[in-house]
Image (cartoon, rainbow, N blue to C red):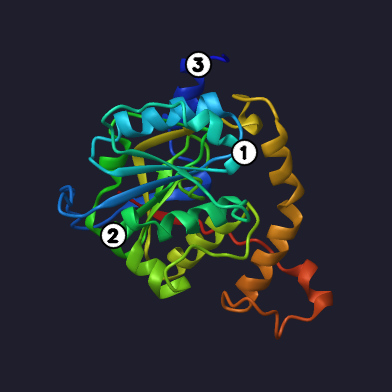
Amino acid sequence: SRSTTTPRSALTSAFGTQSKRCRLKELPNTRRSVLSHENVAVLMPQLGRTDQARNFMFRYAAMAGYPAKFFVLHPPEESAFWDTVNYGKSTIHKVCCPPGVNTFWEKLNYGLELPETQDCDYIVWVGNDHLAGYKWLVTMMVPESLHGVVAANDGYQAGALPTCGMIGRKLLDQWYGGSFPKCYKHNFGDTEISARARAEGRYFYAFNAVLFHMHPIHGFATNDAVYGKAQEWWGEDQRTFLLRQANGWRDESDGVPANKIPELKLHVPEESAAV
């Protein structure tokens, strides 16, 4: 199989400095103790790249530094593969999503409904193309994360966008009635989550929580059908995001004339807090 070893030069470039477009500031009086009494669910929506997904999920659990519950949320057509995967005595759960649960965000929401996640106060979303660094999860476990959003360091976004992140279930309850946003096919769900959290002062960046994004745009993977489908949905998801942003995150587009939609712009704040 294709090696996932990241060149040292690339890691130095990605993690050695903080991006100018996302200047970071430390939280005042931040307690950095682990909240060991809380339960955490790590959800990985799965489609394609099965060998890589199997290995990366094992690494998520092995490198977490925290006894969380891990879930592979795979489609029915991959059951034959996942039935052969043995994670031993780990807390990794392999879950077959029912027909009709197809997109990244639909699978995340299905994961939230599982009996095993009902006692989890922290929800982490990850992809099958992120390479986990040492103690990535325990680094994100700070008190602020229960009522906010914590972005991991994916090597490129520098906290501007949580391609992998943690959110408190209380915040999901407050914003979406206990789910992730249901209106996106693949893209911009994390953009909305970060935008809302920033606006309320609830957005934090865990610089030392490394989940390196092995994405084609960065040269660490080749394009496949899954990446291609995500690109097909880009325009539709962007339009949905812009409409919701202009309407206070409501689904309807009241108050935004159709001829004004192209004028709406994506807003990327200049600062986030670091944990």
**In this rendering, does residue 239 appear at all?**
yes
Give residue 195's position: percent from left, percent from top: 51, 63
Q: Earlier in the sequence, mark 2 or mark 3?
A: 3
* Residue 7 image label: 3
Q: Secondary structure at mark 1?
A: helix
Nearer the viewer's eye, disc 2 or disc 3?
A: 2
Rendered residue at 69%/59% (across/down): 238
* Residue 121 image label: 2
CB under 8 Å between discs 2 and 3: no
Q: Is residue 21 left or right of residue 224?
A: left
Q: Residue furthest right?
A: 259
Query: Picture quarter containing residue 106?
Result: bottom right
Rendered residue at 46%/26% (across/down): 84
Q: Report the amino acid beneath label 3.
A: Pro
Other residues around mark 3 within 10 Å, as few (<14) / some (14–19) / many (≥20):
few
Rendered residue at 58%/35% (across/down): 78
Q: Earlier in the sequence, mark 1 or mark 3?
A: 3
Give residue 21's position: percent from left, percent from top: 53, 47
Give residue 197's position: percent from left, percent from top: 43, 64
Nearer the viewer's eye, disc 1 or disc 2?
A: 1
Residue 116 drawn above or below residue 78: below
